[in-house]
Image (tube, rainbow, N blue to C red):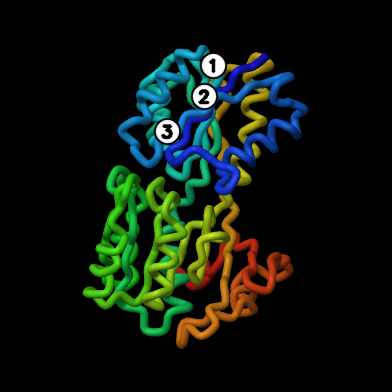
Amino acid sequence: MTRLGFLGTGPAPTPAMSYAPLQAFRQGLHEFDYLEGRDVVIETRWAEGRLDQLSALAAELVGLRVDILVGVGAVVARAAKSATTTIPIVIAVVIDPVNLVAERPGGNLTGLTTFDPQEARKKLALLQEVVPGLARVVILGDQAVRDTQGHAEQARALGLQPQSLTIAGASPDLEAVFQAIRREHADALLVLELPATVMHRKRIAELAAQQRLPTLFPLWGSSDAGGLLGYGTNVIEAMRRLAAYVDRIVKGARPADLPFEVVVRPELIVKPQDGAGDWRHDPARGAQAGRPGHAMRGSATSSTIDATELSNHRLR
């Protein structure tokens, strides 16, 4: 039986609060005919927002003699790499994996990346389209993780005034953050796809709604968080596809022989904001922004569009 170790940055899932990436990974394993308890066992460790604990948790999984380590994000990848040079690591990341691989070329790391070098500019351009007179934008990140996509620089390039704020993964003072946002008279909020912001996305959405602040979330978590927009490549789908890497490694492939797959298929979620004044956005307009012929999926309260090359014609 194959023993897998799953390393997460947030809290352990509960019946009331699941962890979508792990669910998607389990679904992918099932599609390859791996059944838990028969073919695989999944050991999990959770950092509860304390990223400095990840290396120790990875070491615990290594001590359990897992056959493969699995997770989401560069911080998980680095923690796993610090714990082992021999156990295969299969990861889904949103950054350019070249830097991760370059740290230890020919090593034990492989997986998928949703890295799009134009994504930061596209997200800010979307906010410009749907927020009339957008001038000041707050960029909310994670204290423990550097923004590698240069959102502040891209905002300035588009003529915007960025304000970069960060929160801690464990017990963040979000009320103080939003007080700072109010003092700066921000016109919109851009939430980055980082462990702390994903972990606390629902509370962030609640506070943004209280201030009637248009908010763009990463696609991961936007459906249950709220906000005006969600944009990005579906990390959940990438996690489902990680099962293919696990299958190949179980059958004898070496991680060094499995190059990172780049998965960039952006989607846009638009949520009507009833009673929200000037920043209410019609989903039909969002559909027109995508490529002709692409289907719109969703419910009466949200719509999802395949937004590959979305608004590229507007980006200079």
The answer to whether marks 3 and 2 mark residues whose Cβ atoms lie closer than 8 Å is no
Q: CA distance from mark 1 to mark 3?
A: 16 Å
- Describe residue 20's horizontal placement relative to residue 144 as left or right: right
Q: Residue at x 54, y 16 (%)?
A: 66
Give the labeled residue for mark 3.
76
**Gap between marks 1 and 2, in whole Å?**
7 Å
Q: Which of the 4 image quarters holds residue 250?
A: top right
Residue 129 vs 176, above or below: the answer is below
Q: Which residue is depicted at the point 46% across and 82% down? A: 279
Q: Secondary structure at mark 2?
A: strand
Numbered disc 3: secondary structure: helix
Q: Which residue is mark 1?
A: 66
Residue 174, how many percent across, how many down?
31, 60
30 left or right of 101? right
Q: Pointer 1: residues within 10 angstroms few (<14), some, or many (20+)?
A: some
Pointer 3 local density, CA inside 10 Å: few below 14, some 14–19, many at least 20: many
User: In the visual, does 217 lie left or right of 261?
Assistant: left
Q: Is residue 314 left or right of residue 270?
A: left
Identify residue type, mark 1. Answer: Val
Q: Position of residue 165 (x, y in %)?
A: 27, 59
- Which secondary structure lies at badge 1? loop
Q: Are marks 1 and 2 in contact (CB under 8 Å)?
A: yes
Mark 3 or mark 2: name the one nearer the start of the chain: 2
